[in-house]
Image: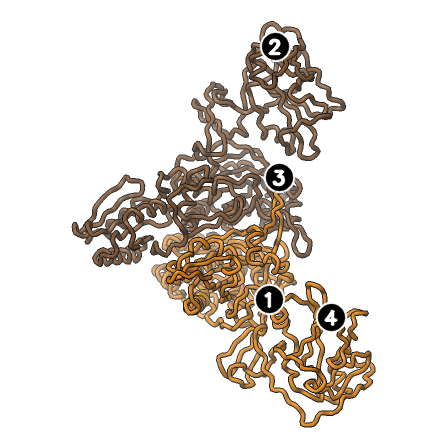
Chain colours: A orange, B brown
Amino acid sequence: MKLDKLIGDRHKERPADCAIDSHALMLRGGYMKYVANGIFSSYMPLKRITRKIEQIIREEMDKIDGQEIMFPVVMPAALWEESGRYESVGNELVRFFDRNKNPHVLGMTHEEAAVQLVREYGQSYIKYPFMIYQIQTKFRDEARPRGGLIRVREFTMKDAYSFHTSQEDLDNYYEKCFKAYEKIFARVGIPDVISVAADSGMMGGDISHEFMLLTPVGEDSIAICGNCSYRANLEAAENIIENIRDDISEPLSLVHTPGITTIEDLCGFLKTEKEKTCKAVVYQKNADNSYIILFIRGDLEANETKLTNYLKCDIYPAAVIEHSGLCAGYIGAYNLDNPNDKFTVLFDKSLEGTNNLVCGGNKTEYHYTGFDISRDIDNPEYHDFAKVINGGICPKCKKNTISISRGIEVGNIFQLGKKYTETMKMQYVDSDGQSNYPIMGCYGIGVGRLAASVCETHNDANGPIWPMAIAPWQVHLCAVRSDDEQVKNTADNLYNELTQNGIEVIYDDRNVSAGVMFSDADLIGVPLRVIISPRNIKENCCEITSRDKSLSLKYQLESCKEKIIETVKNMF
Amino acid sequence: MKLDKLIGDRHKERPADCAIDSHALMLRGGYMKYVANGIFSSYMPLKRITRKIEQIIREEMDKIDGQEIMFPVVMPAALWEESGRYESVGNELVRFFDRNKNPHVLGMTHEEAAVQLVREYGQSYIKYPFMIYQIQTKFRDEARPRGGLIRVREFTMKDAYSFHTSQEDLDNYYEKCFKAYEKIFARVGIPDVISVAADSGMMGGDISHEFMLLTPVGEDSIAICGNCSYRANLEAAENIIENIRDDISEPLSLVHTPGITTIEDLCGFLKTEKEKTCKAVVYQKNADNSYIILFIRGDLEANETKLTNYLKCDIYPAAVIEHSGLCAGYIGAYNLDNPNDKFTVLFDKSLEGTNNLVCGGNKTEYHYTGFDISRDIDNPEYHDFAKVINGGICPKCKKNTISISRGIEVGNIFQLGKKYTETMKMQYVDSDGQSNYPIMGCYGIGVGRLAASVCETHNDANGPIWPMAIAPWQVHLCAVRSDDEQVKNTADNLYNELTQNGIEVIYDDRNVSAGVMFSDADLIGVPLRVIISPRNIKENCCEITSRDKSLSLKYQLESCKEKIIETVKNMF
């Protein structure tokens, strides 16, 4: 490929609206173009990168007996009604009517399609286990697409679905797929991806893992234990609290706290610690806008995912309005007026058995002191609704060694159980003639996000540094001073020879300065650069450098073809 | 791949609702599954076939300097508003609103996306010409999906877009792409595809060609000259008429024709020929339901495409209602009451200068005889609105050698002109500093339809006969009596050896009868079959047959691996 024919523009300047490097560099380098919010077109370099990633994924899925199939992007609503998700999934699911007024959806995931495809095939236990996968376009109407290819609305995904007749068999296969994922991430150039326990969200099922690439720009938070192997997405991480109860419980007392609106001010005013306050966090249910009041220790934050899972419904941070019956800013657990249980009142474990707390007085500018939750509230139920914090207690080794890191989720695997096979009535007959529902697993990797993640961790200020296995080309050949006949001929010959030997070469023979040439090459990020220039020719050699600067060599012109081919192979 | 693990069921019986062989065989053979009207999932064999077809297309597109890119499936309506097609395209275009109430469309073609991608890149003449292509899912909300993969709503398509600074350059590239298409069709196994002149339809532009696979089950009609090279889609084929005028014009006379409702009855009743009748064909405009009355010679049929192109609007066959002002069944060109031109009245060329015609009397049960169109109508304008018929006159060589054949359109190429670059304001600066709009071409191939077309022409009653280049596997290995240890070991070894040598083998080692084994193999349609059986082992050989029955050999076991590899290569 001649560089002067490569479609797409390259830019020196970082675009203003890019929060992360991969987004900025992919725009600067002519990899992709914005079409609409969370929707991009890809130019040739990105398309070549994603095709290579897809091939690596395909190979590893085939190795664990996956069968590549293809589901439709557009599915009839009837299929999603079978599983109940046509109703239960929020407006990330695009719903539309076709010309005959029949409701359809755009595939954001394909559990329903998977069950539909194999429902008749899998009627006997002897067909099991099996796994099907596809690499296909998906659309998820994200509320807040961001970070270039990190969070988009339209994306290419590998999604796999396995079917089993026992939990043990699923466990085995889950482990196999886990290892295949590790191989995939290693092969595309990010071997340091870690796995974390995850929340299953709308997928259902109990056990799930996310594969996380740790990076400060990641949008996920992960609790990692510094002492043992415990790692979990903050959404799913259990919060362990050792509650302290004072020996003597003070009596309850309503005190005037004029002008106090924050926990900090309150602690200052009353000379107490955040840990001795009982904070109210208010949400509302999407379905009926009714209020949920969570009481939690003042130094902790609510984990919305835990709340959603407990309540089994979607919620949003509340706007406490007048006439709601709540006293905004002064909501307290004691003496809360809750006629007919119109509010859902929840207590976080961090309050269990604690006393001498400050809490809202349910009266403007008043708080209670001396609140003893077990004394003053009738049989409160405690659940874990809090976000884990830095220095928190590890649920596994029980040491205070939890730290919070940021990461990009580059893959996920789920044990789905029988959620879809039961709702969609997929059954098989066992060896003893009994009918059963198969157990499912599902396994996803977003291709574009993976490309962006590699870029995020493999770049410098001048551009991406693509690993050889997924680089758009393998060699970037620069003919510096291509107006020099000898340079042009030598470079032309080398280009032809390398290409004939199956090396993927992007060839820059433009009559531009070496500076322009090299900055373009940096943006394209090909791992190996070969430079032919008048000076090199005089020395009867060509210059070889690697994009990551670890390599800088000169080869004799006579032997350079073989040397370059060898070097490329060694860089895989 | 072991056959006993291949997901999908195979059936002996032809499904009841299949009109064509490829549809029936692909359902019987476990290639695909119905999900909704015009929407299918693909099992592994079909996915492997389409991937091979895609790779062949990719190679030929790359050879003519195409750059593989990727457009989104979901596009903002704003993009289609730029070209005017958000309004002008009918309800084949799926329109929907996202969560923020912004209108979007599902890509059914990508001219708008192509211009959007290269609008900034292509600002200087030195960047031209260039071509971009993608292989991507499309959705077209067809009114009448049918024929399995022949006419679907969701499909994978290769669509390519070229940009040029002169008509001559487009002509050259169009010719190049034409030849690339011929190579693609030859490589996938249907070299006998013909090209025909086509109507450009909603794509716009003047010149376009369709590539047609002639088959009686095709849904397109094609006019082919038996004498010269003229070939055109019936939609686009010019109808040439030599009109005959009698020497003497009879006088007009209104005659009572009781109970006469068809042209046949009328001709019988009045003792005249169909060629001497003037028939009214009535349509209505989609936009306002107003009537269009086409007068045409009684033996000819109206060509709706020609009418649509002339009127520049969508139409549908009329229901002539009471109080419409039209006398249903008796509409005539003479004395037609058309106040304020509320009806659009058109005349086909077949009536030009004719006389002594029978036509409707605009009065129930009455017709005129002796109608002389040039005498009785004021300055009628004639246009070509008729369908070409068998035995018609060739527009090129002028002989009566036109015959009508059926065909499947497996590809199309269009010269789009400046329709999209002008409406979407894509300009380049020429060498003399002048701003200009680039000229575009576009080039499509439906991947699934191509697979089905190959199946349609390469099959027998037992299943498809896939050409080696696109077959799901290259060798179908049957271990007949796999309970015989020697058979099993020999077949296992051969399977491993062939696989290690890069041969794609589907291996049937099930303990089933040879009959079941061979009928499954017929449905999978792999071109080369290798049989290991106790009898063969006794003779120290294996049996090789080809799916098309042209080959039936026995090879010594010692040398069979090499022989099979060689045979596979020779079948490409």
Do circles 1 and 2 both sit on a common chain? no
Which chain is home to disc 2?
B
- SS at mark 4 in the image: loop
Residue at 43 percent of width and 22 percent of height: B227
At label 3, which amino acid type do we have?
Lys
> Which residue position holds label 4?
A342
Marker disc for residue A37: none
Alpha carbon separation for disc pair 1 and 3: 38 Å
Counting the numbered discs, the total is: 4
Residue extending farthest left: B539
Determine whether, in the image, residue A363 is placed left or right of residue B267. Answer: right
At label 1, which amino acid type do we have?
Ile
> Which residue position holds label 2?
B356
Q: Which callout, 4 or 2, points to the residue nearer the camera?
A: 4
- Asked whether residue A327 is in view, the answer is yes
Which chain is home to disc 3?
B
Q: Which callout, 4 or 3, points to the residue nearer the camera?
A: 4
Q: Position of residue B423 (x, y in %)?
A: 65, 42
Q: Earlier in the sequence, mark 4 or mark 1?
A: 1
Q: Position of residue A137 (x, y in %)?
A: 53, 54
Residue at 74 percent of width and 72 percent of height: A340
> Which residue position holds label 3?
B419
Q: Position of residue B247 (x, y in %)?
A: 59, 5
Do circles 1 and 3 both sit on a common chain? no
Alpha carbon separation for disc pair 4 and 3: 62 Å
- Asked whether residue A521 is in view, the answer is no
At label 2, which amino acid type do we have?
Asn
Marker disc for residue A20: 1
